[in-house]
Image: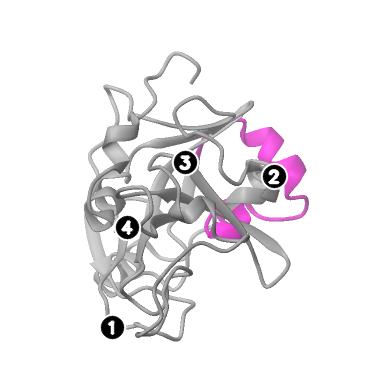
Amino acid sequence: MADDQPLPHAFYARPVVDVARELLGCVVVHGATAGRIVETEAYHQTEAACHGYRKPPLVPGPTERTAALFGPPGRAYVYRSYGIHSMLNAVCEPEGLAAAVLVRAVEPVTGLELMRERRPGRPDRELVAGPGRLTLALDIRLEHDGCDLQTGPIRIVRPPADARPVELVTGPRIGITKAVELPWRFADASSTDVSRPWPEAMRPRARRRGPVS
């Protein structure tokens, strides 16, 4: 993956929902591992599920934890969920505004054996199907918060020329309790590495496929 073209900062300096859709099919590269993005969620400071949200009349602004979220577009915002798992986000929109795309799931591209070593005892279908799982498999940690996604060490690169098309489906975000009505979850229906529960639009397809081994 070293010869692939990283996404420029300008790619991220756009509405977060657009970026969340268009990151599908792109590839996260870290060290000897890489994964094709198959699921994302968008977050914006105007809605209560975003870490940058402040209930009016409070004005959104950075804290020590969320400094990267308010930073320049094209940087990583990495936080610890429930004190356990690191979560990888791509910062979007103009600097000073909190907006980011959570990378929820990838499918292995390179370094599958290394991913298995990092996730011992887990079946392949659970290696990277979830935001906490993929960061373990790709060795993405809290120390990567704020890193430049164009220059690395974590990079997001364009899909290869021969990549299969994305079969886009949308649905409400999961694992949250606020602003749950927003259809800001995006997934590639052609991939079985999308995290569970699958978006509603994928469920008839899942029944046709049968159990995933």
| Image-quadrant location for residue 181 | bottom left
| Image-quadrant location for residue 183 | bottom left
CA neighbours of label 3 inside 10 A, class few (<14), some (14 to 19), many (20+): many
Tag 4 near tag 3, CB within 8 Å:
no
Sequence-wise first label, 1 or 4 = 1
List x then y, in percent, for residue 12.
31, 42
At mark 4, the secondary structure is strand
Q: Report the front residue among 78 and 116.
A: 78
Image position of 7 with respect to 172: above or below: above
Image position of 193 with respect to 158: above or below: below
In front: label 2 or label 1 = 2
- Would you say 134 lies left or right of 151 here? right
Please name the residue that numbered disc 3 is placed on.
75
Magenta span: 108-133
At mark 1, the secondary structure is loop
Please name the residue that numbered disc 1 is placed on.
181
- Would you say 138 lies left or right of 159 here? right
The residues bearing labels 4 and 3 have C-alpha atoms spaced at a distance of 22 Å
Disc 1 residue type (three-letter) = Glu
List x then y, in percent, for residue 162.
27, 24
In the rendered structure, find residue 143 and report the number of the disc placed on it.
2
Sequence-wise first label, 2 or 3 = 3
- Residue 110 falls inside the magenta stretch: yes
Sequence-wise first label, 2 or 1 = 2
In the rendered structure, find residue 187 and report the number of the disc placed on it.
4
Q: Residue at x 32, y 57 (%)?
A: 187
In front: label 1 or label 4 = 1
Sequence-wise first label, 1 or 3 = 3
Disc 3 residue type (three-letter) = Arg
